[in-house]
Image (cartoon, rainbow, N blue to C red):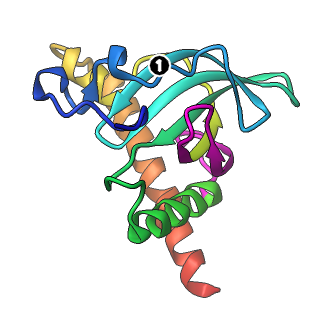
Amino acid sequence: MSSFEGADDARYMLRGRVCVEDAPDIVNTLFDQRYLVTRTLCGSQFAWRFEATDTRLERLVVLNILKYDAPDGYQPETRRAFKLETMIIAYLRSSTTLTIFGDGECATAHGDNVLFMVTEHFTGVPLDEYLMNARRLERMTLVLVLRSVLLSLDAVSYTHLRAHET
């Protein structure tokens, strides 16, 4: 079994996140000869997320490593979809979306060949978690949340239109 396969045990699933104890042990390793992994952030059904330091630019980033979806790695469609998603997100220009600093494929110390994406690091609570934990939102908070969502949708719409122009 590969160290990058996800936990299949449903008891670890909570709102799409998985138990971090099941994450591959890559903390304190240099990933792709550039990113020093400092800690595991979380996992989802599709990817593991790690905090890392970009050793070239000396900045904190998030390393997103796609989980395998086939016994021997990734299905061809998964590779295409991941690359397309990375390109689309990279075109987004909005204060409500994360900036992508890079992506690629890398062999790990465990012998796995994994797809990854590097994004900006942010602190705070993800919107879905914030909304799940909020009992009742004040009107102004609700307006700010809706504004953020609409700005993200606008950025996606703009990017989609731009992609079809080329």
Whole-percent x and y of residue 1?
Answer: 34, 37
Seen at 66% across and 22% down, the residue is 52
Name above or below for residue 102 compared with residue 52. below
Seen at 41% across and 39% down, the residue is 47
For this orientation, the residue located farthest to the right is: 56
Seen at 59% across and 47% down, the residue is 94
Name above or below for residue 163 compared with residue 34. below
Whole-percent x and y of residue 124?
Answer: 48, 16
Q: Quadrant of the C terminus?
A: bottom right
Q: Is 104 one of the magenta-colored residues? A: yes
Name above or below for residue 74 compared with residue 138. below
Whole-percent x and y of residue 104?
Answer: 65, 52
Q: Secondary structure at mark 1?
A: strand
Relative to 56, is 161 on the left or the right?
left
Whole-percent x and y of residue 125?
Answer: 41, 18
- Residue 126 appears in view: no
- Residue 46 appears in view: yes
Relative to 57, is 48 on the left or the right?
left
Q: Is 165 one of the magenta-colored residues? A: no
Relative to 155, is 119 on the left or the right?
right
Relative to 90, is 66 on the left or the right?
left
Residue 18 vs residue 149, the one in the foreground: 18
The quadrant in which residue 53 appears is: top right
For this orientation, the residue located farthest to the bottom is: 165
Seen at 18% across and 26% down, the residue is 13
Residue topped by disc 1: 41
Residue 100 vs residue 76, the one in the foreground: 76
Q: Which residues are magenta?
A: 92-114
Instruction: Determine crowd level at label 1: few under 14, some 14-19, many 20+ residues with C-alpha closer than 10 A.
Output: some
Look at label 1 and name its amino acid. Answer: Leu
Residue 13 vs residue 145, the one in the foreground: 13
